[in-house]
Image (cartoon, coloured by chain):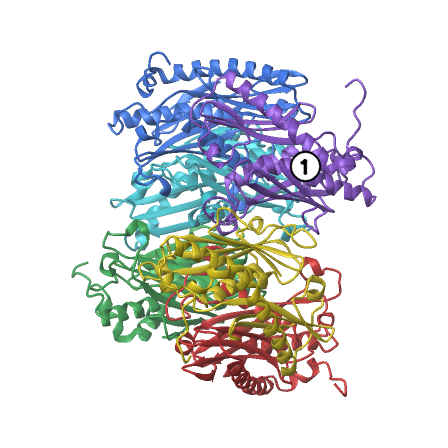
Chain colours: A blue, B purple, C yellow, D red, E green, F cyan
Amino acid sequence: TEIEPNFLKNAPGSVLIRVGDTRVVCAASIEDRVPPHLVGKGEGWVTGEYSMLPAAANRRMQREVTRGRPSGRTMEIQRLIGRALRAVVDRKALGERTLWLDCDVIEADGGTRTASITGGFVAMCLALHRLRTDGLIRKPVLVGRIAAVSVGVVAGRALLDLDYPEDSSAEIDMNVVGTDEGGYVEIQGTAETEPFPRAVLDQLLARADHGLALLHARQAEVLGPILAPLLVPKEPGI
Amino acid sequence: TEIEPNFLKNAPGSVLIRVGDTRVVCAASIEDRVPPHLVGKGEGWVTGEYSMLPAAANRRMQREVTRGRPSGRTMEIQRLIGRALRAVVDRKALGERTLWLDCDVIEADGGTRTASITGGFVAMCLALHRLRTDGLIRKPVLVGRIAAVSVGVVAGRALLDLDYPEDSSAEIDMNVVGTDEGGYVEIQGTAETEPFPRAVLDQLLARADHGLALLHARQAEVLGPILAPLLVPKEPGI
Amino acid sequence: TEIEPNFLKNAPGSVLIRVGDTRVVCAASIEDRVPPHLVGKGEGWVTGEYSMLPAAANRRMQREVTRGRPSGRTMEIQRLIGRALRAVVDRKALGERTLWLDCDVIEADGGTRTASITGGFVAMCLALHRLRTDGLIRKPVLVGRIAAVSVGVVAGRALLDLDYPEDSSAEIDMNVVGTDEGGYVEIQGTAETEPFPRAVLDQLLARADHGLALLHARQAEVLGPILAPLLVPKEPGI
Amino acid sequence: TEIEPNFLKNAPGSVLIRVGDTRVVCAASIEDRVPPHLVGKGEGWVTGEYSMLPAAANRRMQREVTRGRPSGRTMEIQRLIGRALRAVVDRKALGERTLWLDCDVIEADGGTRTASITGGFVAMCLALHRLRTDGLIRKPVLVGRIAAVSVGVVAGRALLDLDYPEDSSAEIDMNVVGTDEGGYVEIQGTAETEPFPRAVLDQLLARADHGLALLHARQAEVLGPILAPLLVPKEPGI
Amino acid sequence: TEIEPNFLKNAPGSVLIRVGDTRVVCAASIEDRVPPHLVGKGEGWVTGEYSMLPAAANRRMQREVTRGRPSGRTMEIQRLIGRALRAVVDRKALGERTLWLDCDVIEADGGTRTASITGGFVAMCLALHRLRTDGLIRKPVLVGRIAAVSVGVVAGRALLDLDYPEDSSAEIDMNVVGTDEGGYVEIQGTAETEPFPRAVLDQLLARADHGLALLHARQAEVLGPILAPLLVPKEPGI
Amino acid sequence: TEIEPNFLKNAPGSVLIRVGDTRVVCAASIEDRVPPHLVGKGEGWVTGEYSMLPAAANRRMQREVTRGRPSGRTMEIQRLIGRALRAVVDRKALGERTLWLDCDVIEADGGTRTASITGGFVAMCLALHRLRTDGLIRKPVLVGRIAAVSVGVVAGRALLDLDYPEDSSAEIDMNVVGTDEGGYVEIQGTAETEPFPRAVLDQLLARADHGLALLHARQAEVLGPILAPLLVPKEPGI
């Protein structure tokens, strides 16, 4: 996994994340208004959008705009990205702003949604750092750190970060979003071929925990000293 | 949980399922053709659609047709219903047919997606029974039986079948689709307030397993002698 | 014709109306705002929406949201429902509110639009009664009472409340919305096979008048003492 | 009422109809295929489309394409036009063809839907004549002749062909589609202010019958010798 | 080229322009508000919309509203019309108003977009004259006059105002929008068969300049004394 | 201008083109079918699609799929790209295939449409080379080579390749698509502030010719020996 920060000149926060042959541009933008149902409530919003270039995968896909609406898969992924990021943001501390996280897949070889979340967290931190250095936010905005991995069972073995051929033949496919402290934010496991027993679930979670620890280390390395001031300090004894 | 079979006169399979104050009409229809990518492959398709009446919940919701597209929530639920049902259908045995499962929520008080799957399995069995008695399918079509429950943590306690007030205040919300033999088909758990540790996940799964066993019993009771001939016999030793 | 009031727990007014095998859920909801062109004019709005469950009729119909827009038939019916109800509402007395009437057909066997209006009038009365007991409206809101029937000519005979097989083979199809005092609010007659002479129109209207009288009696029975205080008193001599 | 035939060079049948200040271009086109549900059945289809130029009425209206769908009013009118024309066409004799009737309102001053039907009948005849002279149809296609009028009650008096100011203040608004032999094809009457009694309906129908007779005469005059060969001869004694 | 002013009763400015067999209704309407991004900036907006009647060309075209969106061709033309007109309007002098120019093609035989601009300029002048006589604008609004021509190379010869058969076989197709003083506002040239050299471009521009001069004369003739007071006076020496 | 070939692993032809800070991924894909109107005619189709990532420019733009349709600007650019590429393709030699050219702007700093065409030509050549080495096409497919430049007048001086600040303040904006032999395929010039005289047009074309020559050299360098066999040989004397 490689994360190239500040990949775009204009967006306040952006990265290019590469996991195997998967490449995703994650860009965090700040808008000075919130959706209608939040106006005047003194809190912000965080939302994710996701798209793949038509030629990103192994055969050209039609653009979603041509059909006039995002596919169910896209909407499901967008909702996952948004929920995952909101889980670690103190929306009061963000203030009445919307943080848009755009995840655009340049090349797809499995695990695009988890790469989007892992890279997206870094892009979000970069944008929040910009808000902080511009004096627009004063208090820490993040209550935690997240990353995401895909794990699966292929030919009876639990694997981390499946590439496309593995993913296509996986018996079980699971995405896990977790914090650096071992808590889970989202678990989505699907039996692709046949129902899986509890023991397999346990193996997959162990594999995921291992992968998440590596990603949290990588994110911290890329962010360096930017990260700490964004995080709400833990109260002692909790 | 009450399941009233043959709720509609025209649909080959239908039920009204009631879980607390939640009521869902599940209707299974058979169409003699398949989506374009399956034409000529000798296998069928199973797909789910989901909608709520505008007045089903505690304040009127706009119809999705007015906005011109289903919401992200609806698409996510539809995809879940479809995946869950396809997990137990032998699509070769179904033949080149599409089985549509329409889940329309008349009244909503939590757990509409899991009620849709639990009721939907019964509606599907009724429709497959009709195909069988009409001589249109000869081999068993089902490789297993499914039901679904929602579980959550409210005020620190793991609960089964949350109603709307509980659901709104849940710290963790989890939907589990499982078979009568204890296998999982889908697990989706989301931290609503803060990340949850492994121990909480274990409690929730135990609670879900208990709920699923009750639902499998109820489904079997409603279906009676119809169910067995639809199921592919288990090979000895598996 | 059976009308079950308060079919839904949440909507301020609702009924399940059953005419033959046709079943429609009619739900009246109140929204505290009006369409843009009425803002600040001190009057309210009444509007109807109509939909059929995909499995309501004798073969599954595609959901309209899938096509992205309501069909012409649906829009025509929605407009008819809205006009019919507005014809008996004093919109000044309603105040700056929108009354939404949602008519969702659970099962269809002819006459769904007229059942929607007949049941919808009762649902509207229940919602207006709620507004009244909540002290939100003080003056009577209704200037009259409406019900609706379908009549038709099948094999040369004028019939009331055609079921689906009759409706499909009708030579003439007519919907009549009328008041308890014998006035017409809407007449829509269509020659399905060949033009009809005046004498046939006369027979159909007589048949419709008879059906309307029965429906008005049924509505009054269901509403009981709720109805009178909602009605603007008739001035003597008119 | 003036009807200018062959208003367009390319369409096989077209007219410009003028009723008061209302002007509508009616164009009949022939397409050598039918909607999917009619393929291979040996019969044709007749369908109408309707639109108004944005500047046709007294204030500019938004184009419907901008909103992405026709309005309910437009769909209602299109369905009326199509039903009216199909009522007099022998679709077997037409053969597997679609006759499109496009009614585009250049200027609107009341009665645009009835002008569309009256002018549309003439445009359709011109197109059918073209098919006949080209040898593409051999048998008469029309089982009757239609025209349409709007009538209404304004300030207590029944009037024919209301212009826009009259239409806006009408107490009752009625559209009648009828044949030259006095049969009705469609009757649509709506109480705009209060329910109307049977006696008023009778007056309106009398007024409509008179108007229809005048329009049938005008249509015959414009069509001249073209009309007779298109009409299926009446059997003696009917 | 014929231009019939005041073709519509209601629009503040309108013409019917005829170029060969091409006929376009151009209508200019005034709306007392501007798009969101201009609110409060003290300037107006000018925008064009374009459509063809389905039967305008040599075979019926589907209405764009049926597809739910304007075609790429339509959007390209609308943008061209809007840009061309805005090029000669002082939007400060117009005030916070939107001038809509609707160009609806009744019959098409080549050159509909250039006819729309040439006729549209006259319609716009008529509407601005109305604003002026109503006292709503006081200063001249036009900084110049525009007209537009299509030129092309057919069988090796540069031609003006190609009709449809010529246009279809043109080797090069060029649209030029120009002022009465010889300046260009827009030049769009496309090689339809093979790339064209500079010398051909020069011939086409000469031909276009000649055509534009004729159109400017025709426009001035139709507008008569209305035109001069709308034009910002040229400063001496420029 | 830098052109990185084979930027994507899966697409048969792809480049990343960089012009100043503008970066565009151009991907050419081959589909083994043609649009309906070309089926069975023995010729292929070439079409372009264009999109910008939301964060590509200096403030986040809404995704077009959210609005349900491409903007007018996008459609105009897509049409230009498609026309430009088709101008140099022998569609008979391509066979019944569609060549899709997807141009996705990663970062935008002026000139994205011309960069798309220049890079797109290289991506198309790479895809055609793949077809050729796979033995799917045997004859040369290209009748010429194209590149595109933007030129403009800023503060009275004709400039090549305007960046975003220059582009925003340009008095005239012109895009020129031309061949390596000096022919023009498309010229689009727009006066942004005031009409421009012939002399300015001449300067802009000279500047464009110069830029095109540089780009043709760069393309040839990147393509190397791949290019020649794709080109239809010039007949002597032409």
The disc labelled 1 sits on which kind of residue? Phe
Q: Nearer the viewer, residue B54 or B2?
A: B2
Pointer 1: residues within 10 angstroms few (<14), some, or many (20+)?
A: many
The reply to whether residue A119 is in sight is yes
Q: At x 82% / y 46%, what residue is drawn?
A: B134
Would you say A45 lies left or right of B201 here? left
Is residue D50 at least partly visible in the picture? no
Give residue A119's position: percent from left, percent from top.
44, 24
Which of the pair F227/D29 is nearer the observer?
A: D29
The C terminus of chain E lies in which quarter of the figure? bottom left
**E225, above or below F187, in the image:** below
Which residue occupies the extreme front position in the image?
Answer: C225
Residue at x-position 35% and y-position 31%: A11
Residue C38: quadrant of the picture: bottom left
Host chain of mark 1 = B
Q: A134 or D230, which lies in front?
A: A134
Whole-percent x, y for residue A133 in the image: 26, 24
For the residue pair B30 and A81, the one nearer the viewer reads as B30
Q: Is residue F188 above or below residue A112?
A: below
Q: Which residue is mark 1?
A: B121
- Image location of residue C216, percent across then percent down: 55, 67
The quadrant in which the N terminus of chain E is found is bottom left
Residue C137 x %, y %: 36, 58
Question: How many labels were placed on the picture?
Answer: 1
Residue occupying the point 26% across, 62% down: E142
For label 1, the SS is helix
Left of B180 or right of it: where is D66?
A: left
In the image, farthest residue toward the top: A237
Can you say whether F218 is above or below D11 in the image?
above
Q: Quadrant of residue E123?
A: bottom left
